[in-house]
């Protein structure tokens, strides 16, 4: 995706490329691949606003049904700012239905996957059986909790004299003493658990 759209919302007469215009029509499930500075964010902003205005699908889409997921909070904040700025510009220059789009744009779900899922779960905390005051662990906290849990499990297996645990710990050591030390059975188990979680594996490991 290339074009002069990168860098923010300029004049309404943005010279969108044929690829970008195809994206805005959103005829079906669509994936976009583009390099840095190609105009991805500007095109995403335009697509979101055209969805609200009804230009992308032929009928207006409720802002609450639109979700834009980013990798970082910083990117989310930038996207929110650009959505608001572009919506304000279109409302001032075109009026009509774009005024309603401007008034609804803040309802678009913009954020990281953790932030979006957190908002969704808090909105339905009772149904999910959760305390609405829950918070998402940061990476460091989650790592520490995993390391402690794995070490306890390894020690329990050794206390139970499980042959596999005794053999592996005898070769690698127990490990799991903290992030400053690496190696050992507990660290190997923690790495395997992280890899399984990344792949979405659940349940016991098949031999």
Image: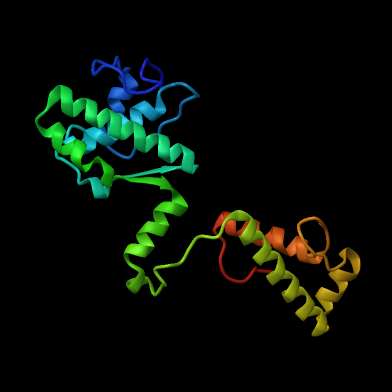
User: In this orientation, which residue lies closer to the viewer: 59 or 70?
Assistant: 70
Give the residue drawn at x 90%, y 70%: 170
125 vs 54, left or right, is right
Quarter of the figure with residue 184? bottom right
Looking at the image, how many numbered discs can be counted on the residues?
Answer: 0
Of residues 31 and 153, the one nearer the viewer is: 153
User: From this viewpoint, which residue is outermost toward the bottom?
Assistant: 160
Q: Quadrant of residue 20?
A: top left
Q: Is residue 195 above or below residue 78?
A: below
- Image quarter (top left, top right, bottom left or bottom right) of the C terminus: bottom right
Where is residue 122? Give x, y as percent: 37, 64
Name the residue: 81% across, 74% down. 165
Where, by quadrant of the figure, is residue 24 drawn?
A: top left
- Seen in the picture, residue 95 relative to 10 is either above or below; the reply is below
Q: Residue at x 33, y 73 (%)?
A: 126
Q: How is the image coloured?
A: rainbow
Q: Quadrant of the N terminus?
A: top left
Q: Is residue 97 above or below residue 139?
A: above
Residue 103 image point, x, y percent: 19, 40
- Residue 182, image x, y percentages: 81, 56
Report whether 50 appears left or right of 43.
Answer: left
Q: Position of residue 94 (x, y in %)?
A: 14, 24
Q: Please, which residue is most extreme toward the right here?
A: 170
Residue furthest to the left = 96
Image position of 69 (left or right of 27): right
């Amino acid at each position: 995706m290339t074009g002069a759209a990168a860098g923010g919302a300029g004049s309404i007469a943005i010279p969108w490329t044929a690829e970008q215009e195809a994206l805005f029509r959103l005829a079906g499930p669509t994936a976009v691949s583009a390099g840095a500075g190609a105009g991805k964010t500007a095109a995403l902003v335009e697509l979101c606003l055209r969805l609200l205005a009804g230009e992308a699908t032929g009928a207006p889409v409720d802002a609450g049904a639109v979700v834009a997921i980013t990798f970082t909070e910083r990117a989310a904040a930038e996207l929110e700012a650009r959505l608001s700025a572009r919506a304000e510009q279109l409302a001032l220059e075109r009026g009509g239905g774009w005024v309603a789009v401007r008034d609804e744009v803040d309802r678009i779900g913009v954020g990281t996957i953790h932030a979006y899922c957190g908002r969704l779960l808090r909105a339905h905390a009772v149904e999910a059986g959760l305390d609405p005051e829950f918070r998402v662990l940061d990476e460091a906290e989650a790592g520490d909790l995993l390391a402690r849990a794995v070490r306890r499990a390894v020690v329990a297996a050794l206390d139970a004299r499980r042959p596999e645990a005794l053999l592996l710990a005898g070769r690698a050591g127990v490990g799991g003493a903290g992030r400053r030390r690496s190696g050992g059975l507990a660290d190997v188990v923690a790495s395997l658990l992280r890899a399984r979680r990344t792949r979405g594996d659940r349940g016991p490991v098949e031999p």
